[in-house]
Image (cartoon, rainbow, N blue to C red):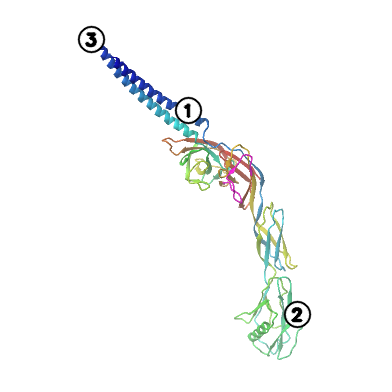
Amino acid sequence: MADGGASNMILLITALLICGAASGILIQSWTDTAASVGINQEQLALDSKTKVTFSGDLAKITCDPALDQITIYLQNSGSSILDETEFGGFIDGQSSSVVGLPTFLNGATEWSSGVVVSFVLQSSEVLVCDGTEEKRVTAVVLTLASGGVFGSDSVSEVVKLG
Amino acid sequence: MGSSVGIGALIMGVTLLSVFAIATTVINNQAEVALEVTNPDVTDKPILSLSNIGNSGSVGSLSIASPGFGYYPGNLVFAGDCNQLPSGEYTVSAEQWQTNNFPDDVAGSYDGHGFSFVELDDELGTVSEWYVWYSVDGALNDPGLAGTGIMVEITANDLGGAIRDSTLTKISGEATLTEIDFQSGAPADTLVADNLNTGPATDAATTLGAPFNIIIQNQGGTITGTSLVTQGSGCTSTPTITITPNFPGGATGSVVVNNMVWDFTFDITNDGDTSIKLTEIFVTIDGGSTVVLSSTPAFTVEYLFPGEKISILDDANSATEIGRIAISSHGMNIAVET
């Protein structure tokens, strides 16, 4: 009986230790999972608030044939603040660098909702600015950081260089 | 043994509760995000329409195509299809003349000679005729020219400068001869006459055989300047101009519109079901810079509500007529061409 009691005690204590360890691992695992899911959810939520649209006259984009540059206007149609310095531009799929500093319209100082910003894009190809050439322009924007995540959006339109 | 089972059960219970709590939090968050993604907090593309495009102008400046001759100053009368016709005025030159050097008298060579001229009493066509004549040593040989005579008494063999000075003295003594400024043409012994009123005048002339002549005759009555009193508005084409002097006369003059400044008008209607902030509508003229929508006078409202229409008058002051107007807002891009 005494032998049986001792072995039972050993089994029980062992079971308790294993149970405790498993509980710890389980809680830690769920905590990590929850944190990861939370970050993804914040990312999703911020993305859903991020929207950029083209402004200006798409059929007569300002174009400089001497410098092979075009000027595009982008409006923040979302509710998050966009970062005008974190911008990617593409002309017909080719990455285009931004020339100079972006310009806020209407006296704005930050790219908040409704604000239009103009960007001058440098084309890697020769541009014909006589109102006949059509180009697909893509813009990718990023929000300012919110809760450690960044929202993003992109817009793509065919424009005529005028 | 019983207590060990209880502790084990307690641990397991607490663990499960913790996991459930975490899981519940995760599920709640997911539900919130799902809701946000389903109803994203972004501005929907508005539905706007453009209508009643107008392209009217006003006169920017004038130019003199032909100065003409024989005009009194007057008005420029505009004609054309304008809501308000422009108005303007023009100015003309003043008559000016000058003699050559007055020579010395030689044994009464001035006697009975002289010169005639016309004084413009005003700029409405009223004139006075005058003539100056010389009497040497009291001979009193009046040439009898048209107008009021001014006798200058000189002595035979007077020097030219003295004769010129005597002439000026006698002229200045005429109380009603006030609209011509007579000066000596220093250092030479000449006489310079400037009409103070602008407009045409009969040329000064000397008598036949006079010892001196009129050598400079600047004509009055040529158009020298124009001014716009009002620029007009709502013109659909460049107005034409008729020269209308304050007193009849003049010919071959022509004043034309040098340049027009074109404004444009249009209506924007909100055909959608959400209000649109006016400062979030942008306009692009003829492919130029994109700027925020504005009007003259400035907007007094902030939003364009569903079904509302606003009229835009943009004082673009462009040198040429506007061909294309584009508006854009939150992904909506529409344009019309005039």
The earlier-in-sequence mark between 1 and 2 is: 1
**Residue A93 visible at all:** no
- What chain letter is assigned to the residue under label 2? B
Q: Nearer the viewer, residue B14 or B77?
A: B14
* CA gap, disc 1 and disc 3: 56 Å
Q: Quadrant of the N terminus of chain A?
A: top left
* CA gap, disc 3 and disc 2: 161 Å
Give the secondary structure at mark 2. Answer: loop
Residue B223, horizontal then vertical, whole percent: 68, 66
> Along the horizontal axis of the image, is B71 left or right of B32?
right
- What chain letter is assigned to the residue under label 1? B
User: Which residue is farthest top?
Assistant: A1
Is circle 1 on the same chain as circle 3?
no
Please name the predominant secondary structure of the magenta segment in the image. loop
Q: Nearer the viewer, residue B264 or A107?
A: A107
Give neighbour class at mark 1: few <14, some 14-19, many 20+ (Cα, 10 Å): few
Give the secondary structure at mark 1. Answer: helix
Badge 3 is on which residue?
A: A3
Q: Report the residue at 70% width, 69% height from top.
A: B221
Q: Is residue A56 magenta?
A: no
Residue A142, horizontal then vertical, whole percent: 46, 38
Badge 2 is on which residue?
A: B147
Looking at the rendered structure, the kind of residue marked 2 is Gly
Q: Quadrant of the C terminus of chain A?
A: top right
Q: In the picture shown, does residue B206 fall above or below A81? A: below
Looking at the rendered structure, the kind of residue marked 3 is Asp
Residue bounds of the magenta highlight: B292-309
Q: In the picture shown, does residue B206 fall above or below A43? A: below
**Residue B6 visible at all:** yes
